[in-house]
Amino acid sequence: MLDKSPDRHSPVDMALVKKLSTTPPHLPPQPTLFQEQSVAPSEGALSNSVLPDSSNLVHRALVSMLGDMIIPVHPGTTKVDFARVRRTLFPGAPEFDLNGLLATNLPREQMALSLLRLFTDFMETFREFYYQNLSSVLFDRLAWSYMYDALKSNRTLAAQYDQAIRHYQHDQRDWNHIARCLEKILKLRFFRFELMKQLIAVKPEPQEDSVAYADRLQQLVRLSRADRDGTDRFTVSVIAESLPDGGYERVKAHFGSEDSIRTVNDIIQFIRKTPGTLSGRTTDRAEW
């Protein structure tokens, strides 16, 4: 269950995010991983390459998706050296641009919502785009290198990502580690904590209909990740308790009890589709 103790991280230190809008006076002196890839291959590098093996699934993917007819491999093996795989620039590739958001002066609560919405939408778009262009075979092996291009509008963020991803071996740079690097750089756990506070206190607004309230709940749940890490039961209870008496009784009548609601999405969709869930007065149900 979520800790309801006073916010130990509030107020959120906006400097942690806004510092990303400045250009560092000096980028790391060594070439980035991505600059290293663009260097012309040496004779030694070419000797550690092979022609595609049609029986090798990864080789076939490199040929069909990237057009590679020479496959870089680790010395003495047939294992692909993904650090030397030629990157293809795909038209329309998504970019993560923080500059517009950082130019605003939003209150902390709105900044948390806006940043997490921007980040979550970008990550979903990036994954869908490169999953299609790299295939399921290559995505977890190469997406890390394309992420640098997606961050290039902010040199500080790109440089920090470059350094963070270096801490993992090439065969560890899967999607989960990419996301972990970016979430740590952007301090997103503090912003999710802010959204969890909003979710705990959520109530229907005056004149808000059930569809609009369901949309608002779904956004808070999605961006705060309140439906993950075993918090489903707590989140279901928070949403049920947010309803006026009439809506709460409808939930109980439909599901039998809060414990019978399997997922957060189940109760949100019930609210969305059931007229009258926001009707009636609200009492303190702890007194029932």
Image (cartoon, rainbow, N blue to C red):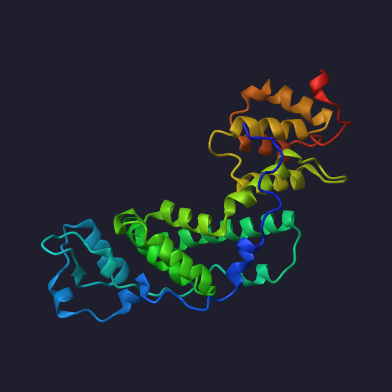
- Give 259 or 167, whichever is nearer the viewer: 167
Q: Is residue 183 left or right of residue 86?
A: right
Q: Residue at x 68, y 47 (%)?
A: 195
Would you say residue 218 is visible in this rendering? Answer: no
Residue 10, can we see it? yes
Q: Position of residue 185 (x, y in %)?
A: 52, 59
Report whether 173 appears left or right of 184: left
Along the horizontal axis of the image, is 272 left or right of 115?
right
On the picture, is 144 further left or further right than 274? Answer: left
Compared with 163, 153 (above or below) is: below
Residue situated furthest top in the rendering: 288
Q: Position of residue 8 (x, y in %)?
A: 67, 44
Q: 211 or 185: which is nearer to us?
A: 185
**What residue lies at 15% left-to-right and 63% top-to-bottom?**
53
The x and y percentages for residue 286 are 79, 22
The percent coordinates of residue 28 (x first, y second) are 42, 74
Quadrant in the rendering for residue 200: top right
